[in-house]
Image (cartoon, helix red, strand yellow):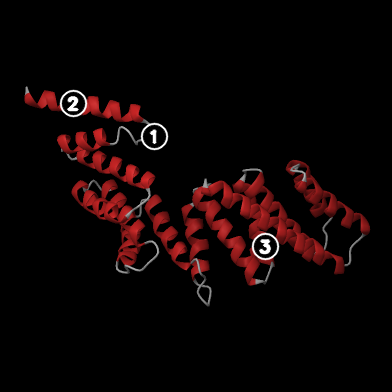
Amino acid sequence: MIQPKVNHLRRQFSKFLFLILILGLSSCDFTSGLNQDILTAQKYVDNQEFSKAVELYERILVKNPSKIIKTKINYQLAEIYYLYLDEQVKALKYYQFIVDNVDDPLWQVKSLEKMADINFSFARNFPEAIRAYQILMQVKPRLKNYDYYYLRVGESYFEMGKYQKAREIFNQILSQPTHPFYIEAFNQMGLIEFYNKNWDKAVEFWLEYLKRERRKDQIVKVKFLIANAYESNEKLKEAYNIYYSLLQSYPNPDVLRARLKSLYDRRVARKR
């Protein structure tokens, strides 16, 4: 329920920002026809006719308007692809234009944050995600989302299979009990050890995670991973007991039933 509300707020904020941009155009020197095209495009956005808005904005850019108008239209195109058309990767080049052409730190930061998110979550281009997050981490004074950027860099290294680099970051977070992602670092360390087939070590981190985590969905997810680690480590009884305990809460109980049957058959075969 939280994510749709967050998306709604993002969209409202985006519309508010672009309204400010449009109002700012009143002092710019451009033809009334261009002005009308921009207002028409914004009406398309307001009416949720996003494809028409994109087409018109692109036509305006072909006319090579002034840099300030070009910049504002690039930002609006980026927001349309990112928030409305669910084509986040297409937004990258428009946000990059903002980064390359706008000196205002506010727009630089917002565009870099979205480029980092798109590369991490949608394009799965983790080197580019790391590059953007590291630029954001270098901003002075430190941005309020600095700790989140640091977490994402660690997660990006993990996704790239660079486990040692990821381990260094999460160990650094674990050395700071007041860090906002201190609890999550236990989960991430468990995943690193799991993928390195260090089953006992993975379970150790996840048990520490469960001591602190309060979100039921995450608890269920990590308990499933613990059972998986036990199963991989031939601790069949322990794995069976955890899978069984999750039958009422796991989102796909058929998966658990299949695991339970497989474990039961393996345990029976052992006794023969």
- Name the residue tied to disc 2: 264
Residue drawn 63% across the image and 71% down it: 105
Q: Earlier in the sequence, mark 1 or mark 3?
A: 3
Q: Quadrant of the C terminus?
A: top left
Q: Nearer the viewer, mark 3 or mark 2?
A: 2
Is disc 1 in contact with disc 2, using a CB cutoff of under 8 Å? no
Residue drawn 34% across the image and 62% down it: 182
Question: On screen, 156 above or below 272?
Answer: below
Could you tell whether 122 is left or right of 210 in the image?
Answer: right
Instruction: Kindly tell me whether residue 74 is visible in this rendering.
Output: yes
Which residue type does callout 3 highlight?
Ile
Q: Nearer the viewer, mark 1 or mark 3?
A: 1
Front one among 92 and 53: 53
Residue 243 lies in quadrant: top left
Could you tell whether 11 is left or right of 264 in the image?
Answer: right
Element on which disc 1 rests: loop
Q: Nearer the viewer, mark 1 or mark 2?
A: 1
Find residue 78 and report its horizontal and vertical position in percent.
67, 53
Q: Kindly report the distance in space between the C-alpha atoms of the residues bearing marks 3 and 2.
A: 58 Å
Which numbered tag is attached to residue 98? 3
Find residue 28 and report its horizontal and vertical position in percent.
86, 67
Dot 3: within a 10 Å radius of its alpha carbon, few (fewer than 14), some, or many (20 or more) residues? many
Question: On screen, 64 above or below 221?
Answer: below
